[in-house]
Amino acid sequence: MFNLDERYRGLPATREQILALHTSLNTPHVAIPGKQAGPSQAFVVGLRGGQGAAVFVYLYLSEAEDCAVYLSGRRNMTADEYRDDEGEALAFVESLGFMMDDANWRAQPAEQQDEMLKALPVFFKDPKLVPAVKARAEEKKNVTTTLGRFLAAF
């Protein structure tokens, strides 16, 4: 069973800590208690840390520039328990309407892994720091400035 854990805002990790990565192929409209409903991306991530392995479900709410992180709470898992948690996490996000794809993290070259770490929202401490979000905020600012100048010309 995966439960929402408000302490997490992202899952910054190194390449070596990531055991598995699954990403959503679609962006269904999701309503999460206490969050603005809207289109979301899902990530299922297996991470190895100081207290053992854990499986996380990260939902990125793009319009709200927010996230929700779910975890099972189990650590120091055996390989079988880890596979069970990974399967439960995938079933959980699929029940929300996501179609998931295995990113084959371990098979990716280091350069591609580094690109993913710099681009995917799941690996940022704050969802507002995701490059696409920052670019969109800058674009809005530029449009507002340009519109203001245009209207001032009249």
Image (tube, rainbow, N blue to C red):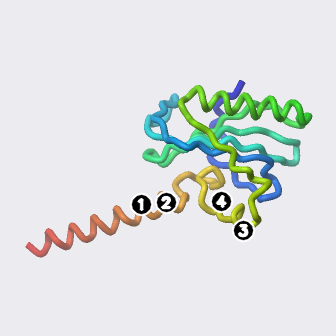
Q: Are marks 2 and 1 in contact (CB under 8 Å)?
A: yes
Quarter that holds the C terminus: bottom left
Q: 32 left or right of 148?
A: right
Labelled disc at residue 76? none
Q: Disc 4 and disc 1: Cα gap in Å?
A: 19 Å
Q: Which residue is mark 2?
A: 132
**Closer to the observer: label 3 or label 2?**
3
Q: Considering the image in quadrants, where does the N terminus appear?
A: top right
* Residue corresponding to mark 1: 136
Residues packed near mark 3 inside 10 Å, few (<14), some (14 to 19) or many (20 plus):
few
Q: From what the image shows, is residue 10 above or below residue 114?
A: above
Q: Which mark sits nearer the N-terminus, 3 or 4?
A: 3
Task: Estimate the x, y position of residue 145 in percent, counting from the top left.
Answer: 27, 69
> What amino acid does circle 2 point to?
Ala
The mark nearer the N terminus, 4 or 2, is: 4
Local SS, label 3 = helix
Contact, mark 1 vs mark 3 (Cβ under 8 Å): no
Q: Measure the C-alpha gap from mark 1 to mark 3.
A: 26 Å
Q: Residue at x 41, y 60 (%)?
A: 136
Element type at mark 1: helix
Q: How many marks?
A: 4
Tell me what residue is drawn at x 17 percent, y 71 percent. 150
- Tell me the kind of residue under disc 4: Met
Circle 3: residue type: Glu
Question: Which residue is at the front of the view, 94 or 36?
Answer: 94
Mark 1, mark 3: which one is toward the viewer?
Answer: 3
User: In the shown orientation, is residue 135 left or right of residue 139?
Assistant: right
User: Label 4 belongs to which residue?
Assistant: 116
